[in-house]
Amino acid sequence: MPGNEKVLAFPVYPGVTPLDLIGPLTVLKTPGIGGARYRTVVVGERAEPLATDTPLQLQPAATFAEVPDPWAVIVPGGGASTLAATENEALLSYVRSAAPGAQVVGATGNGALVLAAAGLLRGKRAAIHWAYQEPLEELGAVPAPERWLVGGRLQTAAGGTAGFELALLLLARLRGRAIAGFGQLSAEYDPQPPFGRVGPDPADDELARTLRHPGSAPTAEPGTGDERLIALVLYPGLTVLDLIGPLQVLTMLQRFAPGYRPVTVWARREPVPTDAGVSVVPDRTFEEVAHPAIVLVPGGALPTIRAMSDPLVRDYVRSAAASADLVTSVCTGSLILGAVGLLEGRQATTNWFYPGILESLGATYQQRRWVEDGNLIMSAGVSAGIDMALHLAARLTDEATARRVQRAIDYDPQPPWGGIDYARIPRLPRAMRGAISLAAPAVAARSKRLTRAERSKAADTQLVTRP
């Protein structure tokens, strides 16, 4: 590797919380010119699929031994699994050996427990998911009330999207404030939780015990008649934060409303590359979840444009949507819905950069965090999927349950420079949006031709089979 390249290592372990990892990775993958040369890498004891606290596996890109001296080492949280990780000697040895030479030693969620167990936080203040403050104290550190805390080399963030916010600050340090602002816009990190901020609650002690001891929460047996599957669709190159935000919300919802089970699906059970430099492995195939109660389609950039014409993606989304109670999307995932003919004449939203394509597919674009039209629920760019998923959780259960989910994932967003001022978007992003709009008719044309051909084939089949 080039001698002046900075390597930011994210060590993972069984049961890691994907949102604590993927949020920072997405921010730090923001393209731009100038600033330090760096790359992010997810490292594990072995470079093989690893279980998370959701129905999704992650594939580390390298082993601990292959990235011995990173410029930064940032440990993501993992719910109750992080308590076990404080005794994972391979993980602790890596963190201890990497930390002395690292310019940044950090953690997100309850990853600070690993730093503390490695002996790096004794007597020091650290931000952490609120439910794990007591275990952090037991390991000799001082829990801080801040959402994120930057103290020299030590940088820690609480749960939910606090790691996203900490990464924006780190991106500004590495590439400058303008690039960090572009990263915030690209991910549309303009959080608007449907119920506002959810702070401390009298029931927090009980909820904390449930989070630290998952066996105390109600569960449903897999395959029970009352189980309703929520299928989250994968495809190569997707923006994985589009997927992870809702998945984290819906996995927590399952803890409190066991009748709903989120599952990740792709054509095959094999690693699927994503935009964040880490591959993910689904737990079901399209065939195994042919008729979900709810289908959710995440977005991306060019890979999503390709997926609009991919017969595997098109066939599954169209057939699953035909029988689903609700059809949902995040970011440019709505373009895939439009590509199979589901948005003609409907109100819809998508990533701020892509409304031209959405409208070329027959939809009416609304610049809102999420839009409902009948059984369709679509959210805007990337991080909006979290807000939409909380709204969905309330629709499936009730507001009290959804608020409990928000508190459980510690989603209390506080962007370091505030939200996005859409009236003052810089010239370059506006030019990029305009270029995409100019290309929109050509992008939409192929999808429209495929939809017409599919409808014609379906009509011919009905004529042949009609008695």
Image (cartoon, rainbow, N blue to C red):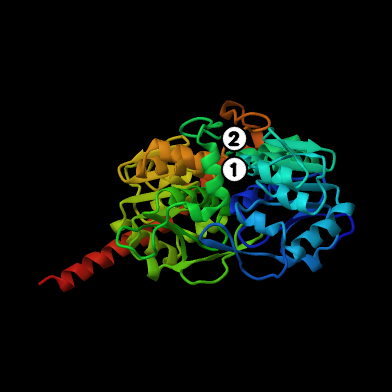
Residue 349 visible in the current orientation: no
Residue 213 visible in the current orientation: yes
Nearest to the observer: residue 358 or residue 316: 316
Nearest to the observer: residue 295 or residue 201: 201
Question: Which residue sits at x=44%, y=40%?
Answer: 402
C-alpha gap between disc 1 and disc 2: 8 Å
Q: Earlier in the sequence, mark 1 or mark 2?
A: 1
Choose top left, top right, bottom left or bottom right for residue 463: bottom left
- Number of the label disc, if any, that sits on residue 160: 1
> How far from the left and from the top, in percent, is residue 144?
72, 35
Q: Amino acid at mark 2?
A: Pro
> How far from the left and from the top, in percent, is residue 425?
62, 31
Question: Which residue sits at x=60%, y=53%?
Answer: 80
Nearest to the observer: residue 192 or residue 298: 192
* Quarter occupied by the C terminus: bottom left
Determine contact: label 1, label 2, CB under 8 Å: yes
Residue at image mark 2:
413
101 w.r.t. 289: above or below? above
- Number of the label disc, if any, that sits on residue 191: none
| Mark 2 neighbour class, 10 Å CA radius: few under 14, some 14 to 19, many 20 or more | many
> How far from the left and from the top, in percent, is residue 18?
60, 54
